Image: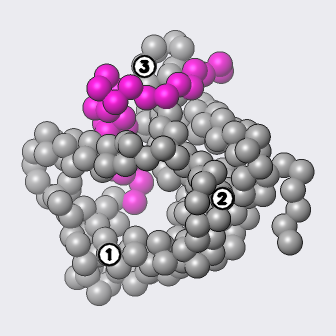
Amino acid sequence: MNFTILPIDYDADILRIATIELACYADSDQELEKILFPYTNTNPSAEKALAGSVSRLIHDRDDPALSFVKLVDPIASEIIAYARWQFYTTDACNPDAVKDYFGRIVQAKEGLYGRAEHAHLAGICCHPAHQHRGAASALMEWGCKRADALGLVTYLEAASTGLSLYRKFGFEPIQEIDFDLSRHDTEIGIRTTVIMKRLPVGHVDV
């Protein structure tokens, strides 16, 4: 499939991108989402859920390191997936749960690569109706090729469901972070996030 990958147009595309994000969340770890972003799951207003997603997706739109790209299906002529890549070549939620979950990831990232030049996959989503057609792989290939051209080590944070895809593109686990979400009045228990690293082609880790 010859997908088209382009920078998103925030004004024209952000609602479709947000719809894809919400569909991915609903199709995957819904229990975790109920803890981190309870308003999305408990409020019957789809409009409020969409507004929350838009707010999260545009908060760093002015980041010069951000490459926010969309993948367009040439047959349906619509966006079916997106990725948020960051290339650093220069130096309405449950606040307690979010701080606990994402705060530990941030601490681990800073300890591993700090302000060194690197690339980072901040997010990738494909609408559930269009999965298993190669969209995610196409977005991964796009970002990895750019990281290779820039000679950048690339990092990402993965759930267990994404490990096989990321390994296919040369990412290897370097640290696991376990979260005990039971402290936030839930029976979910332990969730593990894996920090992964990929070396640019032709480079050797030292």
For the N terminus, the image quarter is top right
**Which of the 4 image quarters holds residue 156?**
bottom right
Residue nearest the viewer, comparing 100 with 119: 119
Colouring mode (rainbow / by chain / secondary structure / one colour): one colour
Q: What residue type is labelled 2?
A: Glu
Is residue 110 positioned above or below 21 on the image? below
Q: Mark 2 points at which residue?
A: 117
Which dot, 2 or 3, sits closer to the camera? 2
Is residue 20 positioned above or below 165 on the image? above
Determine the CA span between mark 1 and mark 2: 26 Å
Q: What residue type is labelled 1?
A: Lys
Is residue 187 positioned above or below 140 on the image? below
- Say if the magenta span includes residue 2: yes
- Say if the magenta span includes residue 151: no
SS state under label 1: helix
Span highlighted in magenta in the image: 1-29
